[in-house]
Amino acid sequence: MSSEDYLKDISEIKNLMNKSTRFISLSGLSGILAGIYALIGAFYAYYIVTNYSYGTLLLDGWVFRTILLTMALVLIASVGTAIYLTTQKAKKNNDKIWDATTKRLLLNFLTPLVAGGIYVLIILSQHRYGQTGGLMLLFYGLALVNASKYTIGDIKYLGYTEIVLGLLASYYVGYGFWFWVIGFGFMHIIYGIIMYIKHDRK
């Protein structure tokens, strides 16, 4: 066998090992769309707060309920899009959708994310709105870094970016909304484009 044949065999073995230990069917396009959904939801919420809150944001007020509903719709649309596009990509590549690797990925991703979500709800119940944007970014970033061991490794860089943005949002409390927009909106779009070019476009 020539050296090229050996290199080809090594590459195939490496790909098989990656498929058995990492979920590599994440769609870059889903990241782009999630960022777009986040921007639409964020600026709709900004419009509502600016024009109808009159300087207050009561937990039992319709403005706050509208913001929560908007965030829920953004989350549902993002998750639904990710599941659909990732499933389509996995079928195209003949990869398994649900196996031990997927379970480990979800467990490592959801543990810090669910804990963070519960903590944010506690903060909101105490009427401390200023820290919520920073906390969302922090816990989301930790979830991405934690899950990166079981999927495309580049996702950890998005996680590190979200953590930095979360810390900045926690320090510059008055600008938490804009850091949230950057983290969940623009960074998702940028990351999605990079992943689409790197992994999806063939």
Image: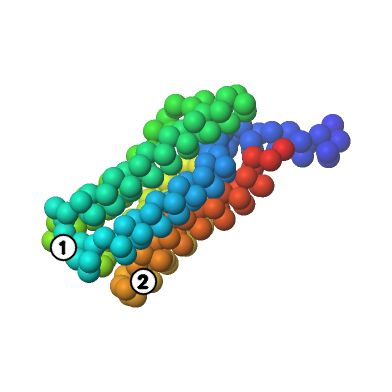
Residue bearing the label numbered 1: 127
Residue 188 seen: yes
Residue 162 seen: no
Checking the image for residue 26, the label placed there is: none
Q: Residues within 10 Å of mark 2 (few under 14, many from 20)?
A: some
Q: In front here: 167 or 189?
A: 189
* Residue 28 figure quarter: top right
- Please report the residue visible at 77 percent of the width from the left and 39 percent of the height from the top: 7
- Please report the residue visible at 57 percent of the width from the left and 24 percent of the height from the top: 91
Establish if 124 lies above or below 36.
Answer: below
- Please report the residue visible at 16 percent of the width from the left and 59 percent of the height from the top: 58
- In what element is the residue under mark 2? helix
- Which residue is most to the right? 2
Q: Position of residue 200 (x, y in %)?
A: 64, 40
- The tag earlier along the polypeptide, 1 or 2, is 1
- Please report the residue visible at 31 percent of the width from the left and 70 percent of the height from the top: 170
Establish if 74 lies above or below 127.
Answer: above
Q: Is residue 117 left or right of residue 37?
A: left
Give the CA distance from mark 1 to mark 2: 17 Å
Q: In front here: 77 or 100?
A: 77
* Residue 120 figure quarter: bottom left
Establish if 198 lies above or below 13.
Answer: below
Residue bearing the label numbered 2: 175
Q: Position of residue 143 (x, y in %)?
A: 38, 50
Q: Is residue 191 left or right of residue 99?
A: right
Inspect the image, locate mark 1, and give the three-letter code of the amino acid beneath it. Answer: His
Inspect the image, locate mark 2, and give the three-letter code of the amino acid beneath it. Answer: Tyr
Q: Is residue 69 left or right of residue 142?
A: left
